[in-house]
Image (spheres, rainbow, N blue to C red):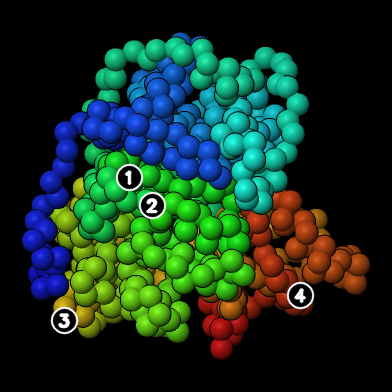
Amino acid sequence: MTDASPFWPSGEPRELPMPEGVLYDALSRAVQDRPDHLATVFYDGVLSYAELLRQVDALAGYLQNSCGVRRGDRVLVALQNSPQYVIAYHAVMRADAIVVPINPMNKIAEVSYMAADSGARVAIVGSDLIDVFAPLLTRDLDAVIVARYRDYVPDRAPYALPACVTQDVASLEGAGWHDWMKVIAAGERPAPMLAGPDDLCLFPYTSGATGKPKACMHTHRSVLFTAVLQARWYGMGKDDVMTAFMPMFHVAGMQGSMNSAIVAGAALVLTARWDKEIIPPLFARYGVTFWNAAPTMIVDVLSSRNFRDDCFARLKVITGGGAAMPVAVAERLKSRFGLEFVEGYGMTETMSPTHINPMAAPKRQCLGIAVHETDARVIDPDTCAELGIGETGEIVVCGPQVLRGYWNRPEADATTFITIDGRRFLRTGDLGYRDGDGYFFAVDRLKRMINVSGFKVWPAEVEATMYGHPAIKECCVISAPDGYRGETVKAVVALHDSAIGSVVSEDIVAWGRQQMASYKAPRAIEFVESLPRSESNKINWRLLQDAEWK
């Protein structure tokens, strides 16, 4: 096993002290401790911990009694960040079922695939997604519970509200539709909870080199582990105010914001959509102490016309990952506010962090050190031999947060896991090295993944969709540098002869945005007569990729 870092947090045990039970028990303890304490804030609409738990139980009871959800069933959750997301997520688990988080940007075909692949027959969705889920009702789903975000916002909220919150929604008619507010008002009681730490509770989807997303099977134990870990690592407690601006369908926002806040008994400030102009007033009004953010969010807020230095008066932790923090911005945070951006590293497969920088000794543009009970190593990706300090290879990890496996994908399990010293390690597909202090640094990617502001985009998945355009003969999806997002998606396209001259790049960009989530869709199109090929006649994506970045 790799030697632990000498910069391990002072006084922190290497083995994580875990509370009894599951995540729902952590919520129950927060209610018992301070039932009237602020749990969520949503554009000044607030829920106490006691009210949060009451609604979680009511929804769990409805899922069981009126929607027929049974132990181990999968339930889709497709909501923007909101109190309803927090309630739905924990209610599904309370009902002994499995949460399948859905990116609200996904299109009909993407959601239909995940419903069929997971076997889910019930969904909980935001009213902004009715058009996406309507075609799936009866065909893929038996029941859809619809939440209106406006129901949890005061009538006179002093903020500019996004369209998904303000839009009017017609009354739901027809079999299979269920109104959220009526569901909660019914007050149905769930049966006693049967699930334990080793039962499955979460199936977040991740894309891969084969192009088809696959579900990561996580247990109550792995979900609770990284929530407890982050609350302890960052020193979060009952008097803290945490942000939920990172999307909670993704494990970074899910664990670093929502679930670590519940474990800590802290207040959670949510917004349905990112708007840099309302963040400073929220920070000032609620005294935010913990900000889980992508680097682009920090750049946005510092440039907001509403930002004042005193907005950060109580802020003590800024953390994030998924994209490197620009050195100039990190230096500005340090010199102007005395704040270090504490970077971490993790994957959907690991319920977020396997590495975090120590609070007392962070290094910049660094993944951090391996966290509690986590064995991280660097191996030669071809021979799987362990490499030494400073040698670049593939990062592999073993720990309680690692997924049990991929849902119905034994072939993916076979290539993703490796046995070292009798232990099962996850191959991350990321190339990096470890320095003499035990800190890990990323160098490159073994896999073809594009990182768009922290969102992972797999070229094979995008290419499979792009080939559905009748004008495209061949295409290769690569990353292109982007000053704001770090990377953006670009498609190098060869057209059919009949389409040359009649199809322009704007046509294909617009078509792509209709077919897939906007962050996946190519923002740039380059037309070529033909694509370069390797000796084995495969499209040489590496040649195109290298040329783009050079």
Amino acid found under the numbered disc labelled 4: Phe
Quadrant assignment for the C terminus? bottom right
The outermost residue toward the bottom is 550
User: For numbered disc 4, what is the local secondary structure?
Assistant: strand
Which residue corresponds to mark 2?
242
Q: Earlier in the sequence, mark 2 or mark 1?
A: 2
Given contact means CB atoms under 8 Å apart, are the residues at marks 2 and 1 in contact? yes
Q: Residues within 10 Å of mark 1 (few under 14, many from 20)?
A: many
Above or below, 216 relative to 178: below
Q: Mark 4 against mark 2, which lies toward the viewer?
A: 2
- Tell which of 468 and 97 is nearer to you: 97
- Res 533 visible: yes
Q: Which residue is mark 4?
A: 527
Q: Quadrant of residue 292?
A: bottom left
The front one of 522 and 383 is: 522
C-alpha distance separating marks 3 and 4 = 47 Å
Question: How many C-alpha atoms fall within 10 Å of the one at disc 4: few (<14), some, or many (≥20)?
Answer: some
Screen quadrant of the N terminus:
bottom left
Circle 3 sits on which residue?
436
Residue that carries the numbered disc 1 in the rendered image: 266
Camera-side mark, 1 or 3: 1
Question: What type is the residue that disc 1 sits on?
Answer: Ala
**N-term mark: 3 or 4:** 3
